[in-house]
Image: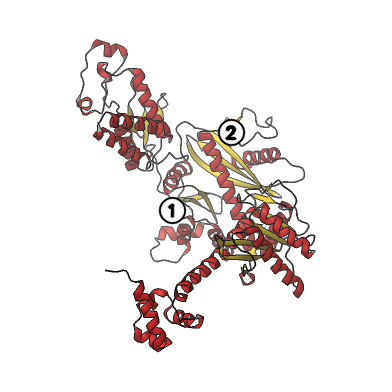
Amino acid sequence: MQADRNKLKEQVALLPLSPGVYQFVDRTGTIIYVGKAKSLRKRVSSYFVESKEHSPKVRVLVKQIVEIRHIVVDSETDALLLENSLIKTLQPRYNILLKDDKTYPWIVVRREPFPRVQSTRQVVRDGSQYYGPYGSIMMQRSVLEFVRDVIPLRTCKLNLSPAAIARGRYSVCLQYHLGNCKGPCVGAQSEAEYAEQIGLVTSILKGDLGPVRRHLEAEMERAAAELRFEQAQRCKLRLDALDHYAGRSVIVSARITDVDVFSLLVDDDVAFCNFLRIRHGSIVGVSTVRLSTGVDATEADLLTQGIQHAVEQIAGDGLAREVIVPFLPSTTLLFDGVTFTVPKRGEKLDLLEFSQKSARIYRAEQLKNLEIRNPERHTERLMEAMRKELHLERQPRHIECFDNSNLQGTYPVASCVVFRDGKPSRKEYRHFNVKTVVGPDDFASMREIVGRRYGRLLEEGAELPDLIIVDGGKGQLSSAYGVLCELGIEKRVPIVGLAKRIEEIFFPNDPLPYYLSRTGEPLKVVCHLRDEAHRFGITFHRQKRSGGFIRTELEQIEGVGRKTIETLLRHFRTVAKVRAAHIEELSALVGPAKARKIKAFFEKEQPLA
């Protein structure tokens, strides 16, 4: 029992702080509870804290949990929608079951002459276009009101077929006189013009605001040119409202009903295949499996293996007729009656990206778990990955990174940060004042600092790093590499340059950049090194610059030397407090003569009334 509790605590510690949905699983593998959270780790951890506020039902639930699963989403609204879908599909024992199908509010564009745009809670396959769902009725109403305010549309229930309009039985209503409708019922608006307006509506509901933005801008300019300033202002307010409009969610879709989605993330010796199941337009299941890459296995082979595993272990009723993938598997003969789709845009691509995000989160959690349980193995794996990625002969257990900082050539400084086994060793960080360079010359500054650093290490017989990283690209790399050649250690210590685009690495005597994998751990370590070097250097530069500005002002006082300035700053801390001090306080600190000079200097600075 205690072992189960410890395992659960480890699972909770690995949960992200992101919004999402969590699932509690009992010993039989059954999901007994589904919940949503603004922060998964904070919410789930609350179940395992002794509290008098926990109801008896919650206490019984917690005792049955042996595993925690979770799905990360982008927002609380998506978490609400996904929780709703999973509760309806899984029917967990400890949830309040949702038995009706009228949970989600949608916006529908009816399939009819002069289509109406309405609110609905039922999705009917009648050819109409459905947009949503929305996390709350308030959100849906605000979007619908926004659409109707921006674009004049009819709201009546009249049959506006061409024959009915031709009979002339209809007359305009109050909405026509208010400017909210252009009167298609009496032939005042053509069907083609109305269709253009519906096109703008569907663009808004899809999240593409470009067409309606251009339409409103043209209307505003035309109204301003005709001196209709109230109408121009109304268009301006509508344009401002566009910036606050939230796009749709990919958690539920009216157009994509039953599909399966697979994505693949390949690491060094392992791969992660994520499986996303969509039924009736809703996500009803997410799982990720870890695969061994084996020997000479291609990404297509790994994807095939991941799909086979899902068919055998997860998808008991087989795959959907359509399967969305990032690329085609190595063979499709194993999956009869299945169409594989590689999307380039639209909602299917959104689902694929959601699946890929889930795979990345799962991999990060696995690595974090490995780091907690077996830190030595994690370090060995990370160092070996860096050795392969950067083409080194040995693992970079000891890395040093340099960065320069100056203000138009003034107060030039440099920083050197040291990482051991991929982690900062802050006690070994070093600041440098650039002494021999005049003006803003980063190349010369890098030569000086690298020469001083490794010249001293050689003199002292100290340990040299396994890798040197220079922040600044090809120019700084050439300068630093030249110094290593002069010291005779260019073959003992590898060096690379880091360009402004963080994934670009330059090697000595190679004009072309090498691109690090954006999904690999080495890039994270290199980013951390670069950020630490920049932070450490810019902090020192600001301190020196601030101190320089303060001393410059005090040094303008005739008869006040460096020791007096240090005495004043130790006592008052800032020049403002020195300026505001009474002469008696200054006299007690530096003597009456200097006190009078200081007060006279600052009084002379005061502007005339």
Q: Which of the marked residues, 1 or 2, is nearer the chain's N terminus?
A: 1
Name the image quarter holding residue 379. bottom right
Q: Secondary structure at mark 2?
A: strand
Is 126 placed left or right of 181 in the picture?
right
Q: Secondary structure at mark 1?
A: loop
Q: Residue 117: x, y in percent?
A: 33, 29
Is 513 placed left or right of 224 in the picture?
right
Mark pair 1, 2: CA separation: 31 Å
Query: Along the line of sight, which residue is nearer the eye, 150 or 532?
Result: 532
**Which residue type does callout 2 highlight?**
Val
Q: Local crowd at mark 1 within 10 Å, few (<14), some, or many (≥20)?
A: some
Does 94 sit above or below residue 582? above
Q: In the rendering, which numbered label is found on residue 38?
A: 1
Q: Which residue is mark 2?
A: 323
**Which residue type does callout 1 highlight?**
Lys
Q: Can residue 274 be seen in the rendering of this structure?
A: yes
Does 175 sit above or below residue 593? above
Q: Local crowd at mark 2 within 10 Å, few (<14), some, or many (≥20)?
A: some
Q: Can residue 420 be seen in the rendering of this structure?
A: no
Name the image quarter holding residue 601. bottom left
Is 25 placed left or right of 460 in the picture?
left
Q: Residue 316: x, y in percent?
A: 59, 38
Q: In the rendering, which numbered label is found on residue 418?
A: none
Q: Residue 218: x, y in percent?
A: 35, 30
